[in-house]
Image (spheres, helix red, strand yellow):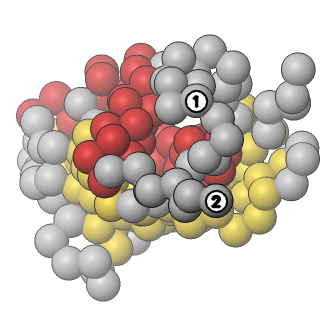
């Protein structure tokens, strides 16, 4: 019996990037804020490039709390959704284009989301990474941390609870 050779890395990367792109386009507020995502394997870092529209207090200047909260919540939803589809993207039994449409994917719904503003968000690019603490059939809990220049100096963090989509 012949051993099946693994898929080329370029094919795997293309499938993952295409799935993440479709997931990002399913949330219009992401493009409104200008949030970008950097994917390394199964780990995703959200990037909020600085623009003057995000400033809430021009005297400091500091990022608006609403844009920070939205950035954190978006990061949590993308991480939770990515984790949800990761297993299926990597399933060798499925066709490569199976999840590219992502029409079968329903996004988690926010139950609550709390933000801790640890210091002022400065007028520069911001980064966030989410960690899924618990995910069940109906409920998920996610923690998000945001920083700017130094990962050890967070300027905001958030915790969210989400209602998981039910299979059809």
What is the C-alpha distance between the residues marked 2 and 1?
22 Å
Query: Which residue is more in the foreground, 130 or 20?
Result: 20
Query: Compared with residue 102, is residue 15 higher up or lower down, i.e. above or below?
Result: below
Q: Which residue is mark 2?
A: 1
At numbered mark 1, what does the secondary structure look like: helix, strand or loop? loop
What is the quadrant of the C terminus in the image?
top right
- Left or right: 158 as drawn, with respect to 126: right
Query: Which residue is more in the foreground, 39 or 8?
Result: 8
- Left or right: 30 as drawn, with respect to 123: right
The residue at 26%/40% (across/down) is: 36
**Farthest residue, direction front:** 1
The residue at 23%/55% (across/down) is: 126
The residue at 66%/25% (across/down) is: 105
Q: Which quarter of the figure has residue 43?
A: bottom left
Q: Indicate the position of residue 121 as horizontal and vertical percent values.
A: 24, 58
- Residue 95 numbered tag: 1
Q: Indicate the position of residue 28 as horizontal and vertical percent values.
A: 41, 17
């Amino acid at each position: 019996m012949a051993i099946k050779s693994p898929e080329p890395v370029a094919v795997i990367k293309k499938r993952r990037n295409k799935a993440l792109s479709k997931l990002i386009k399913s949330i219009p507020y992401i493009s409104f804020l200008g949030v970008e995502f950097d994917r390394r394997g199964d780990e995703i870092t959200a990037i909020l490039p600085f623009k003057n529209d995000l400033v809430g207090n021009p005297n400091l200047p500091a990022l608006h709390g609403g844009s920070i909260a939205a950035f954190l919540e978006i990061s949590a939803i993308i991480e939770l959704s990515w984790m949800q589809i990761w297993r299926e993207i990597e399933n060798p039994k499925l066709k490569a284009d199976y999840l590219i449409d992502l029409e079968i994917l329903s996004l988690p719904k926010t139950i609550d989301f709390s933000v801790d503003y640890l210091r002022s968000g400065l007028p520069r690019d911001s980064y966030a990474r989410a960690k899924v603490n618990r995910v069940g059939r109906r409920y998920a809990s996610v923690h998000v941390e945001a920083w700017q220049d130094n990962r050890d100096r967070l300027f905001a963090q958030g915790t969210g609870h989400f209602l998981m989509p039910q299979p059809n």
